[in-house]
C-alpha cells in the first residue's frame, strides 16, 4: 500500500508544480522520476513522450499512466494519472467557482505573460536536452532536419499536400524511417547444447 501512495504522491507533486504541461514538465519529471526515485531512464521517458504524441490525450497523463502501470500494474496506471491531474482540476474548479472573468483581471493577465516566457525557457531547455540525447549520428540529424523543415515551413510554401504537416503523419513517417534506418541487427544464434 505504501508503494501505491508513494506513486500517487510523486505524480501529485509533478502535477502541482508543472506549469505549461507537455515538454515544459520534462525538467520536473527528470528530477522526480529519474534523479530522486530512479524509476526510469531518460531514454524511456522520451519513448513515452513519443508514444504520447501519436495517441489521444494529454502527454502528462499518458506519461503518468505508462510509468504508473510499469511500476505497479493496472492500479498504478490509474493512481499515477489521478495524482497528476488532481491539482490542476482542483485549482480550475476553485477558480471557476469563485472568480468570474478570471483571465481578464490585469494582475492575472500580466502574470500569465511572465509565465508564458518561463514556460518557453523550460521548453527550450528540454529541446536542447532532447537534441543532445537523440542527435547522435548523421541519420538522426537528417530525419530531424526533414521533420523540422516540414513542420516549420508554412503549408502554402510546400509543394506537398497539407496533411504532411500533421504531427501524427510526421511522427509515424519518422518511425517508419527510423525502423528502416536503425533496424536492429539479428542477434547471433545461441550455441546448441554441448557447444561453446
Image: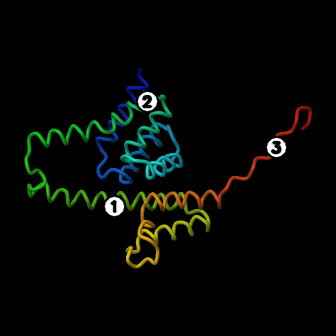
Mark 1 or mark 2: which comes first in sequence? 2
Return the x and y of residue 113 as percentages of the image width and height.
20, 61
The local secondary structure at tag 2 comes to helix
For the residues labelled 1 and 3, the Cα–Cα distance comes to: 49 Å
The residue labelled by disc 2 is: 76
In percent of the image, x 33 and y 50: which residue is there? 21
Question: Residue 16, located in which quarter of the rendered image?
Answer: top left
As rendered, which of 123 and 85 lies closer to the eye? 85
Position of the N terminus by quadrant: top left
The residue labelled by disc 1 is: 121
Tag in front: 1 or 2: 2
93 up-or-down from 8: above or below: below
The residue labelled by disc 3 is: 189
Q: In screen coordinates, is 114 left or right of 101?
A: right
The local secondary structure at tag 3 comes to loop
Tag in front: 1 or 3: 3
- Residue neighbourhood size for the residue with mark 1, other residues' Cα within 10 Å, grouped as few (<14), some (14–19), many (≥20): few
Amino acid at each position: 500500500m505504501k508503494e501505491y501512495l508513494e506513486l500517487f504522491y510523486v505524480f501529485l507533486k509533478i502535477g502541482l508544480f508543472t506549469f505549461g504541461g507537455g515538454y515544459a514538465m520534462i525538467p520536473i519529471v527528470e528530477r522526480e522520476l529519474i534523479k530522486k526515485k530512479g524509476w526510469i531512464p531518460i531514454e524511456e521517458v522520451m519513448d513515452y513522450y513519443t508514444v504520447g504524441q501519436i495517441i489521444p490525450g494529454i502527454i502528462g497523463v499518458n506519461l503518468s499512466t505508462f510509468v504508473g502501470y510499469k511500476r505497479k500494474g493496472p492500479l498504478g496506471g490509474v493512481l499515477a494519472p489521478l495524482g497528476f491531474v488532481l491539482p490542476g482540476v482542483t485549482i480550475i474548479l476553485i477558480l471557476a467557482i469563485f472568480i468570474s472573468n478570471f483571465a481578464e483581471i490585469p494582475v492575472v493577465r500580466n502574470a500569465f505573460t511572465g509565465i508564458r516566457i518561463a514556460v518557453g525557457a523550460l521548453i527550450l531547455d528540454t529541446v536542447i536536452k532532447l537534441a543532445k540525447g537523440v542527435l547522435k549520428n548523421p541519420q538522426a540529424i537528417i530525419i530531424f532536419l526533414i521533420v523540422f523543415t516540414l513542420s516549420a515551413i508554412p503549408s502554402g510554401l510546400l509543394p506537398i499536400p497539407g496533411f504532411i504537416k500533421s504531427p501524427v503523419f510526421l511522427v509515424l513517417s519518422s518511425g517508419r524511417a527510423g525502423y528502416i534506418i536503425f533496424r536492429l541487427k539479428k542477434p547471433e544464434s545461441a550455441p546448441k547444447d554441448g557447444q561453446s
